[in-house]
Amino acid sequence: MNSLADWQSTLTGVIDAERADVAALGPLASVPGPSAEQGCAVYRNNSRGVRGEALSDVYPVCRRLVGDRSFDGLVRRFVRSVPSKQGDLNRFGGDFAGFVAETVAGHESFAGLPWLVDLVRLEWLCHSVYYREDDPPLDLSPLQAGDPSSFCPRPATRLARMHSPWPVHEIWQAHQGPGEPATMQITPGDRFLVIERRQYRPRTVVVDAVLWSLLDACARGMTLGEMGSDPDLDMDRLGELVRRQWIGVLEHRDHAV
């Protein structure tokens, strides 16, 4: 299986390269029919086209905000510079926000959209949580069987988080339907966002800094004992995380339960 994975990785690299290193294909480089370069060019164009369509599906609000021409230009540059190493197209495009940040930095045409990169980040999180696996039902019984302080409450797999100084969740929501959204007053300020999959749809919830800090401590793998010793954490809010089903598993220092 490792040799097959290595071969697939090599083939992907050859196809994505601007100049195909056909020698890396070994004996297949000299099979009868169209040349290896021609074959790679066909696959390269098809692959880039399909990846571009996938990005359009993931980032529809970004497209609406920057316009078709600008968005298509960003997508073309992205798929040319970022090879596809994922067989599942639903997992392609997670680096798009970083690419957009580097590309639009200093461009006057994007100066009026200081929140664009965070919006792209939010779109990816809304997309990605949809395809994450469900955790099994949370089992709290180990807390009674052992030392509770040695357990780490981990966030649910279907959960994502982001902190933004912009109301990107409101911008994203306003552009979900057809037609032009109402004029928005966009002002900077801390927003702590939790993105969850609920009834097969992504939902963005704004939480306060106290709950965010507690959820962040869970994500960092702090034990209940360590969290209880931290004066900056409100352990009384832990039950709220459980009720919201934002805790997916209790993880011991050595194994998950």
Image (spheres, rainbow, N blue to C red):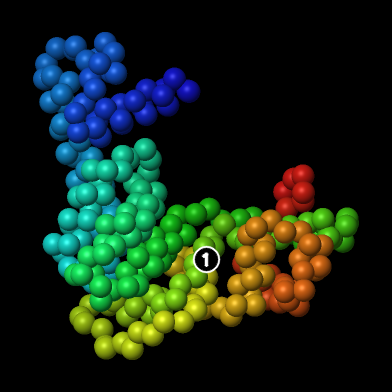
Q: Residue at point 37% right, 38% down?
A: 85
Residue 186 vs 109, above or below: the answer is below
When asked about the image quadrant of residue 99, the answer is bottom left
Image coordinates for residue 241, horizontal then vertical, percent: 66, 71
Front in this rendered view, residue 136 or 235: 235
Residue 181 vs 20, above or below: the answer is below
Image coordinates for residue 64, horizontal then vertical, percent: 22, 70
**Residue pushed farthest front?**
106
- Tell me if I can see residue 247 in this picture: no
When asked about the image quadrant of residue 113, the answer is bottom left
Residue 11 vs 222, above or below: the answer is above
Q: Is residue 199 left or right of residue 47?
A: right
Q: Is residue 206 left or right of residue 103?
A: right
Residue 155 vs 214, above or below: the answer is above
Q: Is residue 93 left or right of residue 32?
A: right
- Tell me if I can see residue 8 in this picture: yes
When asked about the image quadrant of residue 147, the answer is bottom right
Q: Residue at point 43% right, 62% down?
A: 125
Front in this rendered view, residue 24 or 47: 24
Around disc 1, counting alpha carbons within 10 Å, would you say few (fewer than 14), some (14 to 19), or many (20 or more)?
Answer: some
Q: Residue at point 79% right, 62% down?
A: 226
Total marks in image:
1
Q: Is residue 23 left or right of residue 199?
A: left
Image coordinates for residue 170, horizontal then vertical, percent: 38, 80
Image coordinates for residue 200, horizontal then vertical, percent: 46, 65
- Going by the numbered disc 1, the residue's amino acid type is Arg
SS class, disc 1: strand
Q: Residue at point 39% right, 75% down?
A: 168
Q: Which residue is mark 1?
A: 161
